[in-house]
Structures are given as C-alpha cells and as structure tokens.
Image (tube, grey):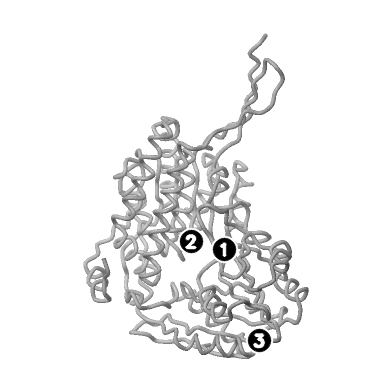
Amino acid sequence: MYLSHQDWQAKAAALQADGNAWIDGRRCPAANGDTLDSINPMTAQPVASIAAASEQDVDIAVAAARRSFNQGDWSRADASERRRILLAIASQIRAHRHELALLDCLEVGKCISDALDDVEEAAVLFDWYGELQDKLFDQVAPAPNGVQATVVHEPLGVIGAVVPWNYPLHNAVVKLAPALAAGNSVVLKPAEESSLSALRLAELCREAGLPDGVLNVVPGLGPVVGAAMGRHMDIDAIGFTGSTEIGKRFMVYAGESNMKPVWLECGGKSPHLIFEDCPNLDAAVDAVIAGIFTNAGQVCSAHSRLLLQDGIADAFVASLVDRISRLQPGDPLDPATRLGPLVSQAQFDKVCHYLDTGKREATLQCGGEALQVAGGQLFVAPTVFDRVGPDQRLFREEIFGPVLTITRFSNEDEAVALANDSDYGLAASVWTTLLSRAHRLTQALQAGTVTVNGVDAVSPQTPFGGMKQSGIGRDYALSGLHKYMAQKTCWIHYQL
C-alpha cells in the first residue's frame, strides 16, 4: 500500500512510542529512573523519552538472559521449533513495517523509503537464518576403528550486541538474527539516538513466540551501558557495529574482564575505482551517487573516495556534478526524498568542520554548505571535492556525511596503491570491462567486499566485514552464525 507524504505525517503525529527498556519479557524503566530524550533531527523536537539504563539494569538483563539460556526453552529447543519462531518474527516485522520504518525515520532522519527497505531486509535476515535451522549438520571426522570423532557447534550462551544509529533496526537484526538462530540469549544495546525500533522489535519477538529472557533490550548511554556490557563477566561474546575508536575500547573491556570474543564491524573509507574502460559511465555515475549519498553518507561502507583514471576524469566529474544537482534534500517523511538531515547537531558540526577543511585543501565542485530544508536545520548539501591528495584529511578520515572526494590516477598500479592507502578496509568497488583486471583487483584490494561494475553489494548469503581497522569477523551468512557458537570436538571410543 502506497502512503503519501501527508499519510506519513499523519502517522507521525499519531505515534505513541514507548522508550522503556525490555528486560525478561516486559517493559520497565531504568532502575534509577533516569531518562534521555530521543530527538527528531528534522524538527529538533523529542520523539520519546528513553530509559537511560544503569549498570544495575545491565546486570538484571544479563541475569535474565543467563537464566533463559540455562533453562533451555530456546537454547535446547528443536530446530523445527526455532525455525517456526524465527520465521514468525519475520512475519511480525513485515506486518508492522510502517510503524518500524516510521520509528527509524523520526529518530535519525532516515528517508522513509530507505527505512521501509531496511525493514524488509531485517525480515529477510530472520527468514534466512530461520530457514537454516533444520538444514545444518555437524561433521563426523575420519577416525581410527572403534572411535568416532565429531565436530559440533554449540551456542555460546549470552551474547552482548551493541549497534549504532545509522541503520537502527537493520543493524540490530544483523546481530540478533544469527545470535538467536545459534541458540543464544541476547542483551542488545541500541544507540542512544535510536532505541525505539529495537525496543518495539523485542515486543514483536515475544508475540512471535520467543521465550521471555531470550532477548533483552537495554537502552542508555554508551559509557554506562556499553562499558558495563563490555566488562561483564557473564557475557560470553560481544557483537559490535560502530566507530573504530569505540570498537577498540571493547577489545580493552574484554581484556579487563573474561577475555570474551569481540566481533567488530567498524569504520570505513571505501574507494570507488573508475577506469577508462568503464563499461557504462552513466551507470557508474549513478553508482557513485548511491555509494556516498545514501543515508546522507552516514554509512560505514560509504564509498567516499572516488578514484578516476585521467582519461575520463573531467567528463565524469561534469556528469557527476550535473546529476548531483538534481538530488534535492527534503523532509524524510516524503517518499520522494532521497537525502535527509544528519542525525544530530554533533554530527552536523563534525561534517561542517570537514567542509571548511576541504575548502582550504581541495577544489570544491559542488555543495560545501549547510542548508535549511522545510524548517530542518541539520542538512548538508551533497558535496564533491576534487584534486584531493592522499596526505589530506579528507582522503584519510571517515567523515560520515554526504561528502565525496575525487583523486585522479594514471594507471592500475597507482589506482591500487591509492585505494589501499588507508587505515580501513571495509569495501571497494571497481568499474572495468577487462576480466583480467577484475580478477587482479579483487585480489589486490584490501577490503572485505569488492564489487565489480556495481557498488557495495551485500546479501544474507555472503559474509560482510572488514580488514585492517574496519573490524574483526563477519556478519551475514554462515560466518555470522558460527561466530556466536563454540566449536567442540568429541571423541568417543566405543570398542574397549
């Protein structure tokens, strides 16, 4: 059913969101009564009051998760039963897709059309991991006569999941679906800017049949809730998506506590390489725009470094700037909007600082300014800086906004050197007609995902994660499941 701008505005006006924590199958305020406001970046008005949980709340949630795990209603449930419930969760997500999309739109300024896509992708993940339940088998290893050696995967226990604000529901499900599918119980900390869709999802999971205590959502401040989870002695693993700086802290927290494994999906500065033999320049221009301006550039794998071969650079830049001129920011509640506001005043100020830096260091091709759109104050015009050198901050630092840098190269070796000249290694994209070059570059580029003649491809069937300071481990696919499981080898001598 199509909803108009006015329809979404009416839904937003009628929305009543509950910001209380979800612990052991029920809503509850923070133990100390503290709250924080979730602010709509479009209107600067509060969306809801969110429970600002304390260390005590984390302890209560972890205890509930441990109890549920030990009871075995979920951890030892039949695969067919877990499959039924995970698929029911996917159905609940789809049934409440408008509400969930609206919560993300209002909290972080995500375009409603993109938020609806995120909701469907979340449902697909529960579908995919649910369908795996009764189709996975452990292994029997070669062994001497009279001996059986098996290799099995078992749930770890209690998983701590910490996710950022840029894709609130989707990032939560990227952790939750495989962790639950593996048989674990979970304590989830959403970002303080974007807690509402995760809290609502927890209620929907219970309605789908997930036992109480298996999923707990504890909102609050990172230095309080996140640190308490990272240091908690009864959390068996942490799955984190967020900045590299905070990811490093979780590694420290693990060392200070129980040496829990920490799986990190962190920052990025992804390169987009366009060679002179690009098979379709118009398609490449569209891909460049999608790769950096989706979600106002607030994407970990955003392709923020455009590397252009000299022979096509000027023509490509002219076409790119012309196409960007048609990308008009607007109210994220309007289904026609493709560029919304930044999430917060702090993020807006950070991006504006980089705009000032770029105007001193590089050639501004378009944008470079703050905008006021429909009364909203946190908009930044889609921006392109040209002639950016590898020693400049714009080239090296993650901006996390709608800012694209362009660097020229003359040959393939130079392109690879520029692409790999980064602390990050999350994703990369290449445009070429040469199959030999495609194979060389997919091997040479230091990135967890390399897409040829496309941009930032991802699916539930393929692992996603980074190299270097972009993280440790992989989300999605079987990799995303097995990292939340312990591998155990069992030797049985049955002829004695």
3D distance between C-alphas at marks 1 and 3:
32 Å
Residue identifier under label 3: 313
Query: Which residue is labeled 2 in the image?
Result: 164
Q: Quadrant of residue 180?
A: top left
- The quadrant of the rendering that contains the C terminus is top right
Q: Pick the residue in front: 144 or 234.
A: 144
Distance from Cα at disc 1 to Cα at disc 2: 9 Å
Q: Pointer 1 and pointer 2: residues touching (CB < 8 Å)?
A: yes
Q: Residue 40: give x, y in percent of width and height.
A: 35, 72
Side (left or right) of 211 relative to 3 = right
Which of the 4 image quadrants contains residue 84?
top left
Q: Position of residue 252 (x, y in %)?
A: 63, 52
199 or 431, which is in the foreground?
Answer: 431
Q: Is residue 408 left or right of residue 100?
A: right
Where, quadrant-wise, is the N terminus in this rendering? bottom left
Name the mark on residue 243.
Answer: 1
